[in-house]
Image (cartoon, rainbow, N blue to C red):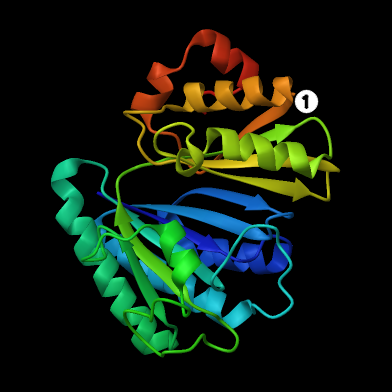
Amino acid sequence: MLECVMNVSEGRDPAVLDALERAAGSTLLDLHTDVDHHRSVFTLGGAVATVERAARALARDAAHRVRLSGHDGVHPRLGVIDVVPFVALRPETQTIACDAARRYANWSATELGVPVFLYDDADPAHRSLPAVRRDAFARRQPDLGPALPHPQLGATAVGARRPLVAVNCELDRDDFAIARAVASAVRERDGGLPGVRALGLRLASRERTQVSMNLVALERTGLETACAAVRRHARRAGADVARVELVGLLPAEELARCSDTFLAWTGISES
């Protein structure tokens, strides 16, 4: 069993999204779309060969239908097929995920002509995704493919990693300064919570702001702890968390660690 969580820089065109969903086929376990991020996250799961075929089919269709030019989403991006992590659902399958990631990376560079940056366990140097975004083309050359971004498709980051949780905490007001301050307060890099990556983003369609988090070390900082910290810092700044939204799937073990009070507050459930 293998999981692949493909991040595509398209979140607004229903016809395109329907086509991409069809391309993913029966491996598609979850689809999360955000108009402000202008981004969709396709979670694929199944047998290794089946997931690899579906990832290539989805990427091929996205390369045909989506262009990076004029993209104005608030989420950072390298390219149309922006991030492609292969996820080891158990520690003993890490090698399988790494091999799948490297096969996909070679295919993407060769067939699509897209520069590829490897990250996490797919990268021999184990560089992180934030490091890729920071250094791509400036301080780091692609691991595979052309030396310059594809004119229509940009570049792709391909990784192999453990499960993580992606979660958005929407604040109850359109104050970008508060969102950025709260993101900094919880972000590990700035002295916040271990394993928390966070961004403050503006949601123009909702006239609100958001703290968008990736929790990459769930054994150190879980979902409830991270969201409670966002709410605590937001309240200190005179705001509050109006909505909590998962992006992709939540590991069952992490759901089991959440209190009934937290689940009632967020509305998160097994379904």
Residue at figure coordinates x 26%, y 55% from the top left: 47
Neighbor class of circle 1 (other Cα within 10 Å; few <14, some 14-19, many 20+) is: some
Residue 130, percent from left and from top: 46, 57
Q: Nearer the viewer, residue 262 or 119?
A: 119
Q: Is residue 66 above or below residue 95?
A: below
Q: Nearer the viewer, residue 10 or 133?
A: 133
Q: Say whether residue 7 is left or right of residue 13.
A: left
Q: Nearer the viewer, residue 72 or 24?
A: 72
User: Which residue corresponds to mark 1?
Assistant: 239
Residue at figure coordinates x 55%, y 50% from the top left: 31
Residue 238, percent from left and from top: 79, 23
Task: Residue type at mark 1: give it.
Answer: Ala
Residue at figure coordinates x 17%, y 49% from the top left: 93
Residue 20, percent from left and from top: 56, 66
Residue at figure coordinates x 29%, y 80% from the top left: 106
Q: Nearer the viewer, residue 100 or 119?
A: 119
